[in-house]
Amino acid sequence: MLLLYIRNSCIEEFVSFLNCAIMKKLFYSFSIVYLGVLIIDPITHGLIGAAITGLSGHSLKLTDPIILGCVLGAMAPDLDIVTHVKGRLNYLLKHRGASHSLLALGGIALSLGSIVHFIFPTSTWLTVVFWTLVGTLSHGLVDLLNSYGAQLLWPFHKKKFTVNMAMLSDPMIFLIFLANLIASLIYPQGNTYFSIAAVLVALVYLFLREMDRYQKKKKLESYFKVSSEQIKVLPAIYKPFSWAFLLFRQDKVIVGILKKKEVKILKELPQWDAEDPLINHALEGGLADIFAAFTPYFHVMRVDDGSEARIKFFDLRYWDKGDFLYTGEVRICPDGKIAEERFYSFGNKNAQGIVLDY
């Protein structure tokens, strides 16, 4: 009982610290803009790679093949951003797909490590490839922490695995490993100790965050008087001090956010009729395939509009500025045929959407 009390007290103090005004102002400056996520995420992977190499006993030098291989290996999987040239929808579907599988991570380490060793042959080929592999694997592991996930077992299994523990780009993780880099550059002799400390602090942070998520889930179960299976607690997008939640009832789905002790309901959606033929037609279309591959938590809703029915799709994971971040719409004719399918990025703020072609 004493240990349980100490653990809960530590978690409460930790959350109170994160919720103080200064920390909020600091962290929100990192996470308020989506572009910031795109920039900070690969940098964070690189910083983690740099910290890992500290465990090798080598000082931070870009001409050291072990350092270079691990840092580049930790960042390389996100080169799938090139898929953006074929449009945002293509990027969303391909990002953290094949490029983040264990098969690809191994291939990246082998090829990249060999190139680095060829340019800087001061360590053995096997050593350089090994540390490059450690870097690529760290990327896959870190990406498992957030709700976007990664297709680790592609091509054998296309499901994205996730533990829903951290934000898409967690500012606390970024700051921990940035501090490690600065300290290692200022005092190179302490690089190994700084790296060990950074890794341990990050692990403690993640542990406390997971304990906080567990407590928040218990609070929601008590608040709504539901079972554990009906509640999903996810990191709130752009909000490191809050948790998003999904509540699945027989008659509706509730999407909300939990800030400190305040439970705020953001949206209530009626459960769809599994026997509705028009909904079933929509679920057989290309848009349904996209949402099924893209998110484990999507919802559909029928809206009748004169002679035409519209089936709306929602990715329940991400809510931002009064709307779901990713939505879609299927227009169905009276005869049941699909007239048009559109995918919307950033909700319906992008009024044109992306029309699916076949």
Image (tube, helix red, strand yellow):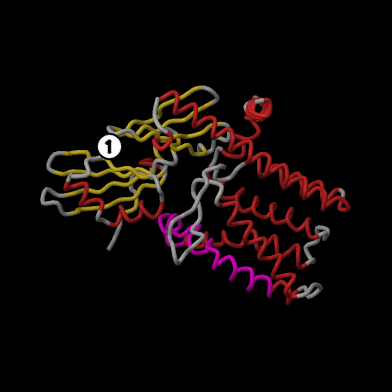
Q: Quadrant of the C terminus?
A: bottom left
Does the magenta segment cover residue 92?
A: yes
Q: Residues within 10 Å of mark 1 (few under 14, many from 20)?
A: some
Q: Is residue 194 above or below residue 259?
A: below
| Residue segment shown in magenta | 85-114
Is 78 situated left or right of 56 in this image? left
Residue 43 lies, in percent from the top left, at 65, 52
Residue at the bottom extreme of this rendering: 118
> From this viewpoint, is residue 22 visible?
no
Q: Quadrant of residue 247?
A: top left
Is 272 situated left or right of 21 in this image? left
Residue 102 lies, in percent from the top left, at 55, 64
Question: Which residue sits at x=56%, y=62%?
Answer: 79
Q: Secondary structure at mark 1?
A: loop
Question: Which residue sits at x=44%, y=40%?
Answer: 318
Is 10 situated left or right of 308 in this image? right
Residue 332 lies, in percent from the top left, at 18, 49
Give the amino acid at mark 1.
Gln
Give the tally of numbered discs: 1
Q: Is residue 81 above or below residue 212?
A: below
Does the magenta segment cover residue 55?
A: no
Question: Which residue sits at x=51%, y=36%?
Answer: 236
